[in-house]
Image (tube, helix red, strand yellow):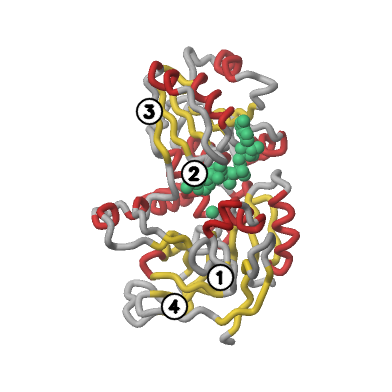
Amino acid sequence: MSNEMKALKKARPEPGLVMSREPVPEIGPDDVLIRVNKTGICGTDIHIWNWDDWAQRTVPVPLVTGHEFAGEIVELGRDVTGLSIGQRCSGEGHLIGKQSRQSRSGKFHLDPETRGIGVNEPGAFAEYLALPAFNVVPLPDGIDDEIGAILDPLGNAVHTALSFDLVGEDVLITGAGPIGIMAAAVARHVGARHVVITDLNPDRLALAARVTDVVPVDPRAEPLDAVVQRLGMKQGFDVGLEMSGSQAALDGMVEALVMGGRIALLGIPPGKSPVDWSRIVFKALTIKGVYGREIFETWHKMIAMLERGLDVRRVITHRFAADNYAEAFETMRAGSSGKIVLDWRQA
Ligand code: NAD
Ligand code: ZN
């Protein structure tokens, strides 16, 4: 193995990323070295590419970016047990601390010291990635590398969708981005009754209908109260999953829910936005903010569901060799694609 690798990095504090040659990362006693096969491009990577305010405040320069990956273990740190060379894996990209109350009580995803690979620490858009063995999630044979590379966002979808009991419930998802669409597939898989997904982008609505059995709605063309009537729900939706970050979508969701309905919020609004709290109080709604995945409960559940028929493959709309990253990012930035996977073995 050469001690140099290709990696996609933010080289300067300006828009874009560059493919560069970097040293293969060194691993510590509790880490593994992973040969990266495939990576997914996330909305977060687009923020980093665009070098928006959030990215400028958050991302150190230079930094190898990327956090959605699948690959195989090629080196084990001295103290690593329970993993082996050649093991196929994905992994949790949040590196947690061990000191906080949350972490020490096993709520790893709520640790305030968390640092993200590809955001705060060297990431996965590279031929090799060093990762704590703790973060490794082995992949069963039935889950190939391109699905392995989108388990991170699927985990967001699963974490959000499983926030509330969906069995027999009528579910409204606002935002048919890759995560909203995968959440719709999960809601179907776990036994929701009606699953409605809204978006303003017709390409995204068409993609949602190709991926799963969902009712796609542009709320400008058909208001949600008309959808409620059309589907024969008496009062409204039982559960809302907000996955657009849009204030208008959240307002519409609050109106379209039944009394006592429940909302899980994953979408990140661009800034502060006015909320009609009295509506939420008088409708006795429950609202839950959702961050990341539950480590490692969400991983367990999503792998189990994938092995028992959950199918999200069609959310992957584009595949590129890693060397063609510029075209891949351009496609993603256009805002109508599903997930885009980069292949690092076919560079
Ligand atoms: P995305 O940007 O690809 O999709 C969002 C979709 O919402 C787009 O298709 C857009 O057209 C649609 N939209 C915009 N306004 C709308 C409206 N008024 N009604 C309905 N749809 C509308 O994003 P994604 O990658 O699928 O992620 C979904 C959201 O989750 C984003 O806001 C993202 O920032 C957020 N996110 C949060 C976490 C977390 O840990 N909380 C993790 C990952 C992503
Ligand atoms: Zn991601």
Q: Which residue is mark 4?
A: 85
The answer to whether the residue labelled 4 contacts the one labelled 3, judged by CB atoms less than 8 Å apart, is no
On the rendered image, what quadrant is the C terminus found in?
Answer: bottom right
Q: Is residue 250 above or below residue 27?
A: above
Dot 4 or dot 3: first in sequence order is 4
Left or right of residue 240: residue 4: right
Where does label 1 land, which residue?
Answer: 36
Q: Nearer the viewer, residue 241 or 63?
A: 63
Please tell me which residue lies in front, 87 or 225.
225
Which residue was labeled with disc 2? 157
Question: Residue drawn 43% across and 61% down?
Answer: 115
Residue 309 is situated, as x and y percent measured from the top left of the image, at: 50, 45
Q: Closer to the camera: disc 4 or disc 3?
A: 3
* Front tag of 1 and 3: 3
- Residues tagged 1 and 3 counted as in contact (Cβ below 8 A): no
Q: Earlier in the sequence, mark 2 or mark 3?
A: 2
